[in-house]
Image: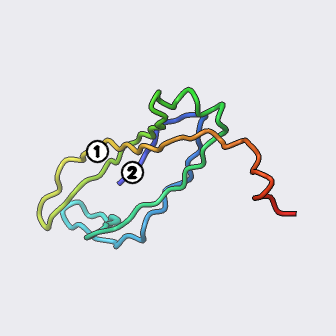
């Protein structure tokens, strides 16, 4: 299994945090492979850049779209299927900083 994301200077992505796999010996190919079973979670932090770097990637609707893909191979007891690629997409609303200073009544001394 492999999770990739588009390369860009507008954001940095950390390495993927994979769960601990179970080791499975496959007699047919005489190899031990890492296996993930059932439900599991992959995690990755993304650090957005400055607004000047993000602006070219933000749509007119104010959305930033992060794209990537997940490549995986599913197997059963006797059959391993061809690897698959799933396209991934995350949308985030990007807002400008609220730069006006708070009113006098809201400021703390």
Mark 1 or mark 2: name the one nearer the start of the chain.
2
| Closest to the observer, 25 or 10 | 10
In the rendered image, which quarter is residue 23 located in?
A: bottom left
Q: Is residue 17 above or below residue 86?
A: below
Q: How many numbered circles does the render carry?
A: 2
Residue of label 2: 2
User: Taking 77 as reference, is 55 left or right?
Assistant: right
From the top left corner, tell me how far across and down residue 89 is, in percent: 37, 42
Q: Dot 1: what SS? A: strand
From the top left corner, tell me how far across and down residue 22 is, in percent: 34, 73
Q: Is residue 88 above or below residue 43?
A: above
Residue of label 1: 86
Q: Is residue 68 above or below residue 58?
A: below
| Closest to the observer, 83 or 50 | 50
User: Taking 99 as reference, is 38 left or right?
Assistant: left
Quadrant housing the N terminus:
bottom left
């Amino acid at each position: 299994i492999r999770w990739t994301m588009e390369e860009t200077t507008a954001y940095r992505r950390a390495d993927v945090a994979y769960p601990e796999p179970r080791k499975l010996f496959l007699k047919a190919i005489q190899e031990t492979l890492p296996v993930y079973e059932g439900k599991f979670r992959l995690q990755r932090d993304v650090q957005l850049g400055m607004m000047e770097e993000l602006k070219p990637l933000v749509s007119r609707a104010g959305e930033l779209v992060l794209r990537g893909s997940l490549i995986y191979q599913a197997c059963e007891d006797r059959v391993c299927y061809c690897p698959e690629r799933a396209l991934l997409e995350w949308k985030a609303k990007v807002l400008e900083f609220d730069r006006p200073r708070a009113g006098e009544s809201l400021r703390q001394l």
